Image (cartoon, rainbow, N blue to C red):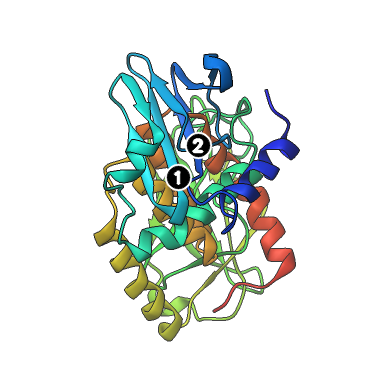
Amino acid sequence: MRSLWQVSVALIGAFSLSGYAQSVTVLATRGDVQVEQAGGAWVRASAGMKLSEQQKIKLGPQSYAALVFAGNKTRELRQPGTYVLGQLLSQRASGEDNPYAARYTGYVLNQAIASGAGRASGRTLGAVTRSTMAPAPRTPAQSAFYPEKVVFSWDRVPGSEGYILEVLDEAGNVIHTQEVPADQTSAEVALGAKLKPGPCYYWRISTRRYASLHSNNTCFRVLSPDRAAALKKEEEALRRSVDLQSALGQALLGAFYEQHGLYGYAWQAYSQAAALEPEADGYVALRDGLSQRAAQQASAAPVKE
């Protein structure tokens, strides 16, 4: 398997405006996906691999590949067969003439590579906290939310009788408590006027049985009305332009959220992408690497409010 450095070099070349005008980069694969090399040899495709239009890609039964073309056009392949990439380029791709989808395709590919797409993931969908202690939060710290939709996610605790979610103000005072059924690992809270743009609020989660053993306080913020309105307008345009029933569409939506610091929503979108294609390496890497990427971004620049 290629090193992360090699994959990163391939990624940079994939989006260069010179030299690789017809390059194609693999975003995610599942099953038996191979590409033809010089001399006719076939090798296994992996996320981050850069291809040329002269090459062929071959899918076995029940396989899948998501491809990113020059200009950030995208294509999902699901049917078994052998495809000439140059011919695929001449066909209409899902991101063609779509400025909203194209805007986030390069971003989502960069994030997949940064998360080590193509390497074995240490987590699985619906991760489990293997103890009776506090559940582990999945919503990254420093997440920003629309004021009317604040959503938190955490790992499931086996045998739990339910969860207790608490929201605290900037001084550490509990301002909201909510019980969550045992079969749920996320919750939307309606706090209305209790939250104002600017301050860092906190949330924490515990099981009902061990209510005093809660997770560490995790910071989140809400957007100002003007900022929220601007992002909602762009989100609506993106939603109209992608297939949200596909893993690639959910990944693009997650990239929109992530790029704007809406990490809680991004976690949900990437989780949905991974659920739609649970064996595709790229989408799992996007989801599992989100917290680390969010932490790096938060340390580099604060979330716009």
Tell me the residue at 56%/16% (across/down): 39
Residue 256 x/y as whole percent: 45, 61
Is 255 positioned to the left or the right of 199 in the image? left
Between the C-alphas of marks 2 and 1, the distance is 6 Å
The answer to whether 190 is drawn above or below residue 206 in the figure is below
Residue 45 x/y as whole percent: 53, 25
Query: Decide: marks 2, 1 in contact (CB < 8 A)?
Result: yes
Q: Secondary structure at mark 1?
A: strand
Residue 63 x/y as whole percent: 37, 21
Q: Which residue is mark 2?
A: 26
Q: Give the position of the C terminus as an image quadrant.
A: bottom right
Image mark for residue 285: none
Tell me the residue at 60%/72% (across/down): 303
Q: Work out whether residue 146 or residue 48 is closer to the camera in this orientation and state it.
A: 48
The answer to whether 41 is drawn above or below residue 150 in the figure is above
Q: Residues within 10 Å of mark 2 (few under 14, many from 20)?
A: many
Residue 141 x/y as whole percent: 62, 58
Q: Say which label, 2 or 1, has the lower sequence index.
A: 2
Tag 1: amino acid: Val
Tag 2: amino acid: Val
Is 165 positioned to the left or the right of 148 in the image? right
Q: Residues within 10 Å of mark 1 (few under 14, many from 20)?
A: many
Is 26 positioned to the left or the right of 191 in the image? right
The answer to whether 186 is drawn above or below residue 301 in the figure is above
Q: Secondary structure at mark 2?
A: strand
Q: Work out whether residue 115 or residue 67 is closer to the camera in this orientation and state it.
A: 67
Q: Is residue 209 visible?
A: no
Q: Which residue is mark 1?
A: 68
Residue 117 falls in image quadrant: top right
